[in-house]
Image (spheres, helix red, strand yellow):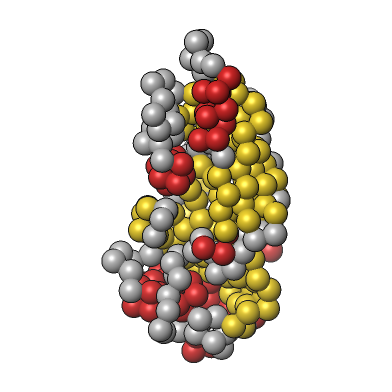
Amino acid sequence: MPVPATRIVKTEEELLGEGIDTVDAGGVGKQRPYGGGTYRVSGQVNRLDRHGPQRNAGTYIKVYVPRLPLIIVTVLAVLVGAGWLVDSIAASRVERAISRDVEEAARLDVSPRVNVDGVPYLAALATGEIPSISVHALDVDVAELGMVNAQTRLTEVQVTRDQVLTGDISGAPARSFTRTIRLDGVALGRLLDMTDLDISHPYDISPAGGVAAEAQLTGTPFHQREPSTVIVDLRLVGDEFRMTPRELVDAPADQTDEEAQAVRDAFTLTLDTRKLPLAGRASTVNMSGGSIFFEAQRFNVSVAMSALSPVEVTGD
């Protein structure tokens, strides 16, 4: 892009003495200091005019942007893009391999979704560690519960270079193993013999979790005409999960004391968490997003592909 013209009142010999490389009919060419590129002064070279461009009699300077930085930035962008592509392909390949192995070991009908963490994933070739591996299974049919969603997560998995590339992590040591299962209204309603159970949080705050939590349940107990809403306490006591009504929030207006007690009884549940597909007794319980979550955790484990299944597998 042309910049304001500058007219120069110097002889050819003076211009060459100041570092101008050439003086020709089209103007002069000057080398910038420190290799910063060149610019050309084209047109007439006669006298200095400081009052702006004069297109008919003036001279114009064309500035050329140095190409070296642009080339460096372009090369770096290409290398980063290629590296990201290779890393993504390697991670996807490992995720598919783990998913296939878990499906076969657990005899699942649907391949579970697998996520391997680490950015970039191939950094594990140098560190010897995959930060975490998660296996998600949706709508798994569990005896007495029906369809449940489950997630298994391994953290700080120590792996060899071959395991990083192939995804065969069987036998690899991991810092922790966490299994989480989610019971929605359908699954919990099956345990309570209610087909219209709805689960929500009783207060407009973020739900807490741990060995105790609370939830608001709305459903129609067996042999009742209308739905009732009850706030229940969720407790883990040893191996047991205990759900106990604390407050009857909404019920038919003509409900008797006996019927109210029957409603409380209908929303009462005691469950041995060792019967849940948790690979151990539950350590935490919480309510979130219309579902109740149970979690069990173990530390310093050796990875077994069947253990990544959302359901217990016998006769491995």
Could you say which quadrant of the image residue 184 lies in? top left
Which residue is drawn at the image coordinates 50% and 10% (left, top)?
254
Q: In what quadrant of the picture does the C terminus appear?
A: bottom left
Give the vertical position of 67 relative to 286 (above or below). below
Residue 201 visible, this orientation: no
Give how far across and how far down residue 161 sits, in percent. 53, 88
Query: 43 above or below 80?
Result: above
Report which quarter residue 213 is drawn in: top right
Q: Looking at the image, is 37 positioned above or below residue 193?
A: below
> Of residues 86 and 104, which is closer to you in this image?
104
For image coordinates 42% across by 28% down, the residue present is 220
Q: Which residue is at the far front? A: 258
Give whichever of 169, 6 is nearer the camera: 169
Q: Is residue 150 or residue 169 the one in the foreground?
A: 150
Residue farthest left in this picture: 109
How far across and how far down the image is residue 266, in percent? 51, 35
**Left or right of residue 137: residue 23:** right
Q: Horizontal and vertical percent for residue 98?
A: 42, 75
Q: Is residue 257 visible?
A: yes
At x 52% / y 29%, what residue is drawn?
263
Q: Position of residue 132 (x, y in %)?
A: 58, 68
Q: How many marks?
A: 0
Q: Nearer the viewer, residue 7 or 1?
A: 1
Check the image and report above or below for 111 versus 292. Answer: below
